[in-house]
Amino acid sequence: MTLKQICDVKNHQLIISLPDSFTDKKKVLVTIEDDFETHADKITLLKLASSDPLFLSDVKEVSDDFNSIEHETL
C-alpha cells in the first residue's frame, strides 16, 4: 500500500499517523520532499507554457517529426 500525505514540521520533527492497514509492518519507506507545488501553481505554469515561444516551437518540431507518418497504418 502507498500512502501520501503532507505533514507539518514542528521543531524539526514529523509525526506521521499510519492507517490501520500498516499495523503489522516493521519497515516503511519515507521520502521527504520540501519543494512541492500546489495544483493551482501547476495550472498557472501550464497556462504560461501555452504562450511560451520556446515551448511552442518544441511542440511544433515534434509535431512536424510525426507528420510524415501520421497517415500510415501498422
Image (cartoon, rainbow, N blue to C red):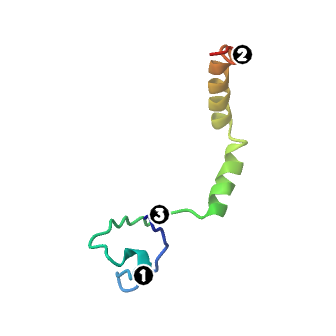
For the residue marked with disc 2, what is the amino acid? His
For the residue marked with disc 1, what is the amino acid? Ser
Task: Find numbered disc 3 in the image and state the secondary structure of the residue it sits on.
Answer: loop
Left/right of residue 20 with respect to residue 48 in the rendered view:
left
Left/right of residue 71 with respect to residue 41 in the rendered view:
right
Residue located 28% across and 70% down the image:
27
Instruction: Specify which label sits upstream in the sequence, 2 or 1.
Output: 1
Task: Find numbered disc 2 in the image and state the secondary structure of the residue it sits on.
Answer: loop
Instruction: Specify which label sits upstream in the sequence, 2 or 3.
Output: 3
Is residue 49 in view? Answer: yes
* Foreground tag (2 vs 3): 2
Residue under pointer 1: 17
Label 1 neighbourhood size at 10 Å, few (<14), some (14-19), many (20+)? few
Which sits in the foreground, 52 or 30? 30
Residue under pointer 3: 35
Is residue 18 in view? Answer: no
Which quadrant: the C terminus?
top right
Residue located 65% across and 52% down the image:
45
For the residue marked with disc 3, what is the amino acid? Asp
Residue 52: quadrant of the picture? top right
Q: What's the CA distance linking mark 2 and mark 3?
A: 43 Å
